[in-house]
Every structure is written in structure tokens, then in C-alpha cells.
Amino acid sequence: MNYRIAYERAVNVTASGLAMVAQRLPLIKNLTPIFGATGGSHFAAPLAVTFVGTHALSGQSIMLQQTNTSEPTDVVEIEVGEAFQWEFKATRYNILSFSIIDDNGNEQLPPGVVSIGPQSGIGTIGGIPEEAGTFTYTITGYRGDNQRSSQTVPFNLTLVVEDPAGSPFKIFMSDYFAAEELANPAITGPGSDPDLDGIDNAMEFVLDLNPSAFDAMPGTIGVDSNNPQMLRYEIPLNGLAIETTVGFEESESLQGQWQPTLGEFVERTDTMIVLTAPLAGKKFYRLKVTIEE
């Protein structure tokens, strides 16, 4: 047996009302004391209560709508590495919080994409996507903070992130150089160093530096906190260079023969590479990057 109870309230016929929909779920007790009904109606399951914002005068549900375009859309098509911003608000009131849920029930946006706000009732989703794919989300706005009080009708948003034409390295270089310079490998080739800072373009890409301006080598170096006999060198990496070969080489001298450092001393993630090396003895290390055109 299904039970459905609707309860509406308007205060001084102001701009808003409240609709409460109760639906049958497992586990329930007598609801008579709650609603003040007469008789002995008993239920076999507890209530799941959802508050949906409605307008007291029109009876219309409160919706979410995009605000930063003349042609609102529920499908955003962008490319990896392309900045975007999608803003939204409720149709009748300023939302104070919102939720963004993916198909798996998680509040997790794609790498490089974040949510901001609401600020003055406007929520924002944006950033620079770092991986391709199709991502579907359900967005719900709330009149109260911390996702409380009445809520808007859920809005479905789809992000379609495509791989851009060309390699990640070429896309990276196109952010800093004109088309004529991009066609000249002496300027924008992987082994070139147009800013004369001693860091070639391939390394600038992997380290997410500016290949058109003088940069210093990034990273932190010090004694390993887990082993005082070891040196630890951490270098941040460009998240778009995850398929680029990056590793350390070592030599007994700067003029000697360079050999790959053993894997047990090197750890790489999508955003960092770490070298641990014995403090005892003398060795030289260098970072090596290989770009496949």
C-alpha cells in the first residue's frame, strides 16, 4: 500500500511557500501525532521527506538556470586545457548552497574543474579540465546554507571534454607563441631554449614553466624525514604531461657517463616526481625528459 501526503503553507501570501512530499519507505510508525489526524491509521514504513521550493502565488517550482550566456545550455563542450566557466542561479530566490552529484553519487568534479560559491546567489563551475571524457552531474540549489531548507528542482549538466588536436606539448607551446614561431623548431622545438634560461622547451612543458620568460628550476630539496641518511628532492610536474617520459639520470662526474637512476630511488605521480638518494658518497643527478612528436 502506498501513502502520499502533501502539505503546503504560505505565510502572509509572501513570495514563497513550502511543499513537503512524504513517500513510503521501509520502517514506519504511527503518523497520527505528527499530522493531528483522527483515527488509528498506522503505516508499515517511515517517511522520506523532501522539501521542494515552490512559489506561493504561482505554484511554480523553483528552477536553476544558467546566467553567463544569452543561450543557456545543459551541455558544455570544451577541450582539455581550455578554460571555461558555467554560472547558475535559482529562478525565484538567492541560493545559499548547492550540491553537485555525479552518476555514482559522489561530489567529485573532473581534475582541473572546481565549484565556487554561491556568491550573491550565483554558483559557478569552471576551471581548466585535465582529462577527456563525458561527465554528467545533478545540481541542486538550496535556500539555506550547508544544503538545508527548501531546494530547487535538480538540474542535469553534462560536461563533454574532448582531446584537442595536436600533442599536449604543442598545445602548451601555443599558449606562449604565435603561429609563425610555432612553425619554427629553432624557437618552439622540444630541445630549443628561446628564453635562454638553461631549461629547454620540453622541460618547461613538463615543469609547467613559461618557455618565453626566464625561469628558475622548481622543486624542494632536503633530508628525507623518514630516513636521515637519504636526500629527498621533490619536483612538481605539469598534470598535462602524464604521458611524457620523465626520469632521473646519475653520474660520478659532470663529464662522466650518465645512467638511469634505479626505480627504487624514483617515485612519480601525475603531478610530482621525487628522487631519494644516499647522502653518503658523491653523485650528480639530472632530470631527463623525452618528448615524442
Image (cartoon, rainbow, N blue to C red):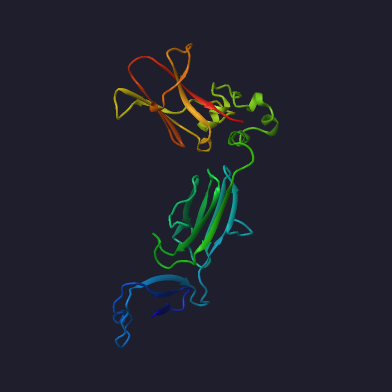
Res. 79 visible in picture? yes
Task: Tell me if residue 238 comes above or below residue 255 in the rendering.
Answer: below
Residue drawn 46% across the image and 70% down it: 53
Residue drawn 62% across the image and 42% down it: 164
Residue 261 screen position, x and y as percent: 43, 22
Residue 233 screen position, x and y as percent: 40, 26
Q: How many marks?
A: 0
Q: Which residue lies most toward the right here?
A: 180
Specify the quadrant that holds the C terminus.
top right
Q: Quadrant of residue 25?
A: bottom left
Task: Tell me if residue 29 comes above or below residue 84 in the rendering.
Answer: below
Q: Is residue 62 left or right of residue 221?
A: right
Residue 141 screen position, x and y as percent: 47, 62
Task: Tell me if residue 228 comes above or below residue 174 in the rendering.
Answer: above
Res. 275 visible in picture? no
Q: Which residue lies most toward the bottom here?
A: 39
Q: Quadrant of residue 23?
A: bottom left
Residue drawn 38% across the image and 71% down it: 49
Q: Quadrant of residue 187?
A: top right
Camera-nearest residue between 287 and 59: 287
Specify the quadrant that holds the N terminus.
bottom left
Residue drawn 54% across the image and 21% down it: 198
Q: Is residue 196 left or right of residue 141?
A: right
Residue 237 screen position, x and y as percent: 48, 33
Q: Is residue 163 left or right of residue 249?
A: right
Task: Tell me if residue 290 comes above or below residue 133 in the rendering.
Answer: above
